[in-house]
Amino acid sequence: MNTMTTPLTVAIAVPLEAELVDSIRAVDPAVTVLYEPDLLPPERYPADHAGDPDFKRTPAQEERYWDMLRKAQVLYGLPNESPAGLARIARENPHLQWVHAMAAGAGGAVKASGLDQETLSKFKVTTSAGVHALPLAEFAAFGILNGFKRSAELAQDQAAKVWPELRTPTKLVSGSTLVVTGLGEIGLETARIARALGMKVSGTKRAVEPLEGIDEVADNSGLAGLLATADAVVNTLPGTPFTERLFNRDVFAAMKPGTVFVNVGRGTVVDEDALLEALNNGQVSYACLDVFAVEPLPQDSPLWEHPKVLVSPHTSALSAAENRLIAERFAGNLRIFLDGGDLPHLVDTVHFY
């Protein structure tokens, strides 16, 4: 294991502001940080980790980029922010010990790299899980409020310049019940905001255990029982073989009519045909969706034009503070790594989450 006095080289593989690179350098004098901004694509917006797709390195720059990464034991970001980049550096850098990914759900990228278990066992991959918890939780609250306050119907009436003769009441969020699937960092932050709005919260967790502020905790097999009294459901679960199409016809049928559904986890957790049926029969009154089974959402998907659906292009986790928050998380993890501790938020290379 590393100690505080062991020299260590970190390479910045993705776009990052110079002042944040300096904050990583400041963690320990034993750390050398390789950073060549001219080799990194410019960001089009804050936290654009992949950078401008039109950016092209010259052949000489391309060789400098990969040579820089081959010199490091630690990478900040997947090379070129891609599974192929991770696969290449794993083959070419025998000294690689740790890669920190920008995404909270980096397991999919690790799986897509196609690396075998023997190769994956030679280095660690950590995610930025937790950094996105607050913006995702705020988006979930936004979705719940939209559903309860009939924002989709209001927008339709406004577009048509309709002033209804009969006024329609909205639902109170306070006193209603929320079920959160996936009581991890995102789920618990969602629960915190929901409780601040006066909601009662239950949810699911792989390892069932009492959680402060959560009325009832079950595993996925107990989800249907929780849904019977839920007014809103927020999914935060990652995409794994165990969560694939968890929200199927039976699960939607277990909801009480008029449930508001929000998905900030992964699109593969939802059977979209079953969701459309639930929207059309009134089982789900409104769906706020940031993620989809196929992304970008295909042009022929009925979700685009459904009057009870808000389509968000997988952007709810983004915030102007993201680069700073990820750099701070990495700096904290780097201190742990140098001191020989256990890194948090490791990618499970068996289940890939």
Image (tube, rainbow, N blue to C red):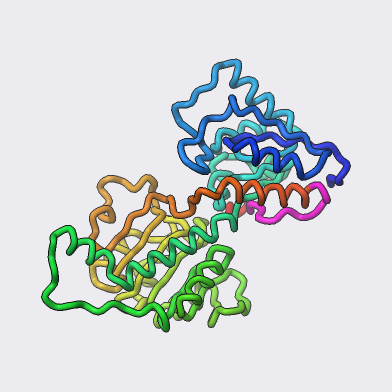
Image quadrant assignment for residue 219: bottom right
259 on left or right of 340: left
154 on left or right of 11: left
Residue 18 drawn in magenta: no
Image quadrant assignment for residue 148: bottom left
Q: Is residue 214 above or below residue 96?
A: below
Residue 347 drawn in magenta: yes
**Residue closer to the observer: 149 or 346:** 149
**Residue 265: x, y in percent?**
47, 59
Query: Which residue is located at x 82 percent, y 51 percent?
Result: 340
Query: Which residue is located at x 61 percent, y 77 percent?
Result: 211
Q: Is residue 319 above or below residue 11?
A: below
Magenta range is: 338-348
Q: How many marks?
A: 0
Query: Which residue is located at x 37 percent, y 58 percent?
Result: 289
Query: Which residue is located at x 14 percent, y 78 percent?
Result: 166
Q: Is residue 142 above or below residue 321?
A: below
